[in-house]
Amino acid sequence: GWDWNDTMEFHKEFLRRWFVRHATGGGYIHSGFRARDVCDLIYSLFGRQSVSGEDKSGEYDGGSLGNSMDHIKYTVIHSRYMEGKAGYRMRKLARTSKCDRLGAIHMSPEYVRSILENLALDGRGNIVHKDGQGGKNNNSNMNNNMLHQPIILFSDGQIPEIVEQNLLNDPIIGPNLIIFNKELLDGADIALSVLADVFIGNPASVTSGFIARSRISLGMEQNYLWRKKRKEDFGGSSWFSVCNDECIFKPKIMEGLI
């Protein structure tokens, strides 16, 4: 029978060829211009010559960026509206996966917080879960979670009053937010997304789906595309994941978007 793990080999081979072109700046992108070195782009965002995040005890301070890529901790939010097509596609995906039909489109501060505030950094900078479901907790004001690390937003800019404006106005997310319009990078958004410590994507987007499948094929964890809101008994609400990594590979879930 069909095994979703079999499709990983395609993504691994594609990534080998793709990163030779884009990650080193040695090839050409579809517009005819030479590809940009993605490592240089990352260093331009986070700094190349920064103070090391390790002290004499070997503990990671959770804030400064070291000379090693291991010290760069960042999240990518991949937001796509696609001239309204995202809404139609998400309605179909909500039926097959049981995820919320608007959460991955609006990317509200509450939605993003529910993920990042529960991803803590331990003493050596490794990501650990604060709880099992990604719901609410009382530690969101502490600087030891991914909510306080750089957050890159790749957006098509079609609903800025909902996505960009709300994220920028959030008192914690806003100061850590870096916004890129898709035309500015022309492919580098895929590489940066694949390399991210946390990826928050929209499953209605073919590009988001490709990024997620590529990350999973490479063994990258912390992929969030399938979220649902539930009401709590004590009032309020929280978000949780309803579909695992396998869902992004399943044709019956993806409704032909693979």
Image (cartoon, rainbow, N blue to C red):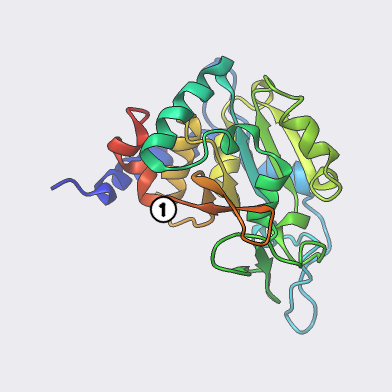
Q: How crowded is mark 1: few (under 14 residues within 10 Å), some or many (20 or more)?
A: few
48 and 172: which is toward the camera? 172
Against 102, is 76 above or below? below
Mark 1: which secondary structure? Answer: loop
Q: Is residue 16 left or right of residue 39?
A: left
191 and 158: which is toward the camera? 158
Residue 202 visible to an observer of this rendering: yes
Against 49, is 25 above or below? above
Where's residue 228, x and y in %?
53, 46
Where's residue 148, x and y in %?
78, 56
Where's residue 69, x and y in %?
66, 57
What residue sits 56% from the left and 17% below the top? Answer: 84
What residue sits 76% from the left and 67% below the top? Answer: 139
143 and 11: which is toward the camera? 143
Q: Is residue 205 left or right of residue 178?
A: left
Residue marked by disc 1: 244
Number of labelled discs? Answer: 1
Where's residue 111, x and y in %?
65, 46
Q: Residue furthest left?
A: 1
Q: In this view, does 127 lie to the left or right of 49?
A: left
What amino acid type should be assigned to the residue bearing mark 1? Asn
If the image is split into quadrants, where does the C terminus sit? top left
**Residue 37, picture quadrant:** top right
217 and 38: which is toward the camera? 217
What residue sits 55% from the left and 15% below the top? Answer: 31
What residue sits 39% from the left and 42% below the top? Answer: 97
Residue 24 visible to an observer of this rendering: no
